Image (spheres, helix red, strand yellow):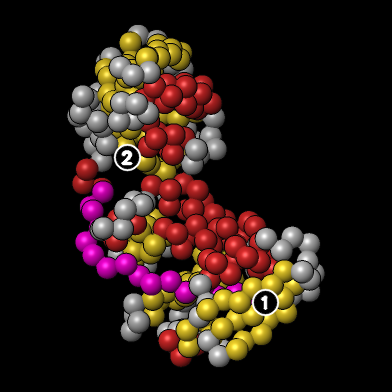
Amino acid sequence: MCLVPGRSLAEFVSSLGSQELVSLETDGEKLKIKAGKFGATFAGISATEFPIMPRMTEKSSIKINKKIISEIAREVAYAAAADESRPVLTGVRWSVEGDKLLVTLDGLILPARTIMELARIEDEGPAFAEASAGKDEVEMQVVKENNQVIFRVGKVEVISRVLEGNYPEVDKIIPNEWKTRVTLDKAELERAVRAAGIFARDNNNIIKFNVQSSMFNVRAAAKESGESEIEIEIEKMEGEEGEISFNYRYVMDYLGSIDKERVILEMSGNLAPGVWKAEGEEGLTALIMPVRV
């Protein structure tokens, strides 16, 4: 046996097209693949270098509905940081209150890509779907000795490391009060932000929202490319007029994560975090930090 680069192997196999038969043969620390007229030899290393993988035991485990995993991947995991200079920020924090699972196991921080991969397996992997047929739950068990967590769906197991570090206390920075609260049509806002983003790209991705009377103004400008100003009718407004600026990519990420028809934006001034909610989805809150302009 030998170990070969997984990404390179996956890319090669995906190029085989409709080849039905694939032969694999190891030669020392090399893997030879033959499929019709396609052939490749991958240089690898000894299989003994691969870490010993933990196995799920009969100890108590947590069972999570598959739908919840998909919702976490769509509604939460997108917000994790991509920069791994602070690994803890690339994770999704889980906590438990009574019989409720809160995603924001107590203090457990899992890589966001682990959650995304579980959801992808469920959505796109026919072999995995067959192995987990009839199973509506994902079984989860923490292996504290190895600082790892195991997910099991039917016959499939996914093992991930647990991230270490101090996760930001998000609850403490969510404003308890708001000065301005508007309800907007999600599709209209998404189109407006996407259009204004064409110009925001040339100005550090900055986009400005301005609330005036019954209109919601979306504006972006850059010296090199020009400017855009779009008006959206506010479906419901509470409080006073105001303005705030965001990185438009963060707004697009949020809008792409929800499937409700209307979104709510709560503002407490142009330097306080913007609180986003989907109408009818009380358990989901997104926080986007403003840009100082």
Return the x and y of residue 287 as percentages of the image width and height. Answer: 32, 39
The secondary structure type at the circle numbered 2 is: strand
Image coordinates for residue 159, horizontal then vertical, percent: 47, 74
**Foreground of the two, 99 or 88:** 88
- CB under 8 Å between discs 2 and 1: no
- Badge 1 element: strand
Q: Marks 2 and 1, Cα distance to the nearest angstrom?
A: 49 Å
User: Is residue 277 among the parts visible in the rendering?
Assistant: no
From the viewer's perspective, is 161 left or right of 66?
Answer: left
Residue 89: x and y, percent? 30, 55
Kindly identify the residue that appears in the image at 53 percent across and 34 percent down.
260
- Picture coordinates of residue 280 (x, y %)? 49, 36
> Mark 1 or mark 2, which is nearer the start of the sequence?
1
Q: Looking at the picture, does residue 269 appear above or below residue 231?
A: below
Left or right of 57 on screen, residue 204 = left
Quadrant for the C terminus in the image:
top left
Residue at x 47% of width, y 84% of height? 45
Crowd rating for badge 2 (residues with CA inside 10 Å; few <14, some 14–19, many 20+)? many
- Of the two numbered discs 2 and 1 in the rendering, the one whose residue sits closer to the viewer: 1
Name the residue: 50% across, 48% down.
74
Say whether residue 168 is magenta.
yes
Q: Name the residue nearer the viewer: 277 or 2.
A: 2
Residue located at (40% from left, 14% from top): 228
Which residue corresponds to mark 1? 33
Query: In the figure, is residue 57 to the left or right of 156?
Result: left
Query: For residue 167: magenta?
Result: yes
Q: Which residues are magenta?
A: 155-170
Residue 287: which disc? 2
- Asked whether residue 268 appears in the rendered view, the answer is yes
Foreground pick, 124 / 82: 82
